[in-house]
Amino acid sequence: MDCNTQNGKTPPSSGASSDGAMDGVMSFVATGNASPLLHEIKHALTQLINDGSENIIDLGAIPFAPGDDRILNDILGTGEVHAVLSLQGESHVRETGVPGVWRVDHLDENGEQQSRFIEITFMPNILKTQREDAERGLETLAERLGTLDDNR
Amino acid sequence: MANKPMLPELMKTHGVSRRAFMKYCASLASVMALSPAMVPRIAEALENAKRPSVIWLSFQECTGCTESITRSHAPTIEDLIFNAVSLDYHHTLQAASGHAAEAAREQAMKENYGEYVLVVDGSIPLDNPGYSCIAGISNLDMLKETAAGAAAIVSVGTCAAFGGIAHANPNPTGAVAVSEIIKDKPIINVPGCPPIPVVMTGVLAHFLTFGIPELDELGRPKAFYGESIHDRCYRRPFYDKGKFAESFDDEGARGGWCLYKLGCKGPTTKSACATVKWNNGVSFPIEAGHPCLGCTEPDFWDNGGFYKPLSVPAGDYRKMGLAAVAGGAAVGVASALLSKAGKAKAAKAHETVDAHDLEK
Amino acid sequence: MNNPAFDLLMWARGPGFDIALIIFVAGIVLRITEIIILGRKKDMAPAKGSPVAQGIKTIFSRSFPRPGLVKFAPITYIGGYIFHLGFFVAFLFFAPHIAIFEDAFGISWPNAGRVIIESATALAVLALIALIYSRMTDPVRKALTTFDDYLVLILSALPLITGYVAVNKLFGDPQMMLAIHILCVEALMIAFPFTKLMHAVSFVFARYYNGSIQGRKGAES
């Protein structure tokens, strides 16, 4: 399934899809939720442009089959940005082919899918440095500079 | 002990960035079926949560629940959450044993009286306290004593929540659930044999941040036990079209068809297996080709057999049916012969018949 | 702790079904045995035709109404057909029901999809409503109606309605609604040998007897 390789998820070794043919079939199993979701995204993007308000949609909250994923990927496409974060497992932040619509996919340490979001924003929050991390970074930098100066 | 390092300190010690923490809160919100808008609240609540003392009592159990929760994956923030609670007593995980362990439990209870969380797995035998004792104290006594000072009780696994396998026919030890003994404390039931790890940690996380989650009529958190397997099953289209696997490994089974005829209890079972799945979302029993056992429901061991479809009668009806045929035939012959004899007698006596006789 | 709905479901699937099955089977076998043994009055006149051949023919020919009768009592005939056909489709071609036969006798046959089953159920229930309405409004039939007639109509409707509700989870706890459905079926089974529901079995005998009487006389039936 193309959505699996996009998210870096390894295909399950057990389960009904024991051959590639089943994967091909499964990618057409759809719930019909792709279209309303895409309309919601369009609405959110309009809001973002008009007044800057951001929206996050949790893909785990609605029944979503591989067929719906296929439709979503076909419509949104791939964009210019792909950031890979190492946060207790990988996280992939991708801007889709529709700027302003981002996919945020969290994986755990085993490479298994943890959660998936669609963010309609100018910049996903998780890409920004968190204040507390910067404060800790300052401490670390001060420490290291201290060591550097000592060793001169 | 309890009320020591809060989560931010722990994260710093383990080198976990706040960004990673945000990722965890986002995933946790998704798993708890909360809106992404709640993520900042979850983060704030988790950061500021006091570190409660947790006492974990294991009674008549197989340790599967402990295994499920603690061993499913590499150390993650869920583990950190577990470290964020002060696990003051746990048979399998603690280093101490014997008197030292019991002393630790008693001290934790005294220091945190009224505030600690009591987690129980395993059922409690009522027939004879001797069936299950720890350090000479019967399960029943230990439960009552420890529950007295608990803020809330979490019954993990179907054994603690509903009685489980020990409670199944003929229940030789008189095993009962926690809720049948403790009536005056809030109890959260997290059933499953075992429960999904992330459901367990999700419930704990919810409890730490927002208190007791919304519970259904069996005391199970609605966030994880609100939907039946059947309503979320990916094989549902096959059920609707009438495509069923007739036996294991037949064409239908290999085609991923519905497992109703193989005994799947999905329609009457409420659990998160079909959406949250197991092993971090890899699969769940039906996806692996085995019908659902219904393990989050009370008395699932006695539901007629794992491989008997829900619609099929569960008893030994074939014998009854044959007995009924024989009995019916016998009585029928007897009654018919009696009637014939009566008819012959009536004919001999030249009895008359009128319309009213026919209506009898 | 026990889920009361689960206990009810297991009772319905266990002792409840056993009781219902015994009464159902024993009752039917008893009455059929009586019918056969009691037999009929011997006809001493010489036979003009074949009773057996005509008797068997009548068993099938009576499945189609005589010309003119449908116009005479359209609701009874059309409603009756729709109800019986809908009931049989919903009962015999729904996979969970076929599973019961498979468990009991080892035989199975192809099942129909949910759309067909649900349409059949809905049509059957509508037909029953029409039948009970016509029975209550037509003065002649109302005068002839007894408790047995109303009881049988309601007992036939309940499994259809409760089955539909249980499968579609329209309301109520799923285990409870399934239990209620099975209990309604068991009520039908228990009432079967004591009411006019016996026609489901005795129609074969009734039609054969009528046909053979005429056949013996050399007439068609």
Image (spheres, rainbow, N blue to C red):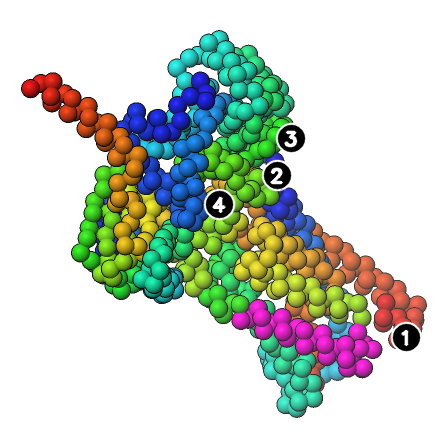
In the picture, the quarter occupied by the N terminus of chain C is: top right
Relative to residue C164, is residue B56 depicted above or below? Answer: above
Disc 3 and disc 1: Cα gap in Å?
70 Å
Task: Residue C152: give x, y in percent of width and height.
Answer: 72, 66
Label 1: element kind: loop
Nearest to the observer: residue B290 or residue B217: B217
Give the total number of marks visible in the rendering.
4
Task: Residue A34: give x, y in percent of width and height.
Answer: 35, 62
Q: 10 Å neighbourhood of mark 1: few (<14), some, or many (≥20)?
A: few
As drawn, the label of residue B354 is 1
Disc 2 and disc 4: Cα gap in Å?
21 Å
Q: Amino acid at mark 3?
A: Lys
Label 4: element kind: helix
Tell me what residue is drawn at x 44 percent, y 36 percent.
Answer: B45
- Of tags 1 and 4, which is closer to the observer? 4
Q: Amino acid at mark 1?
A: Asp
Residue B134 magenta-highlighted: no
Residue C125 magenta-highlighted: yes
Q: Which residues are magenta?
A: C119-145
Residue for badge 4: B223
Judged from this view, the residue extending furthest toward the left is: A152
Residue for badge 2: C2
Q: Quadrant of residue C158?
A: bottom right
Residue for badge 3: B183
Q: Amino acid at mark 2?
A: Asn
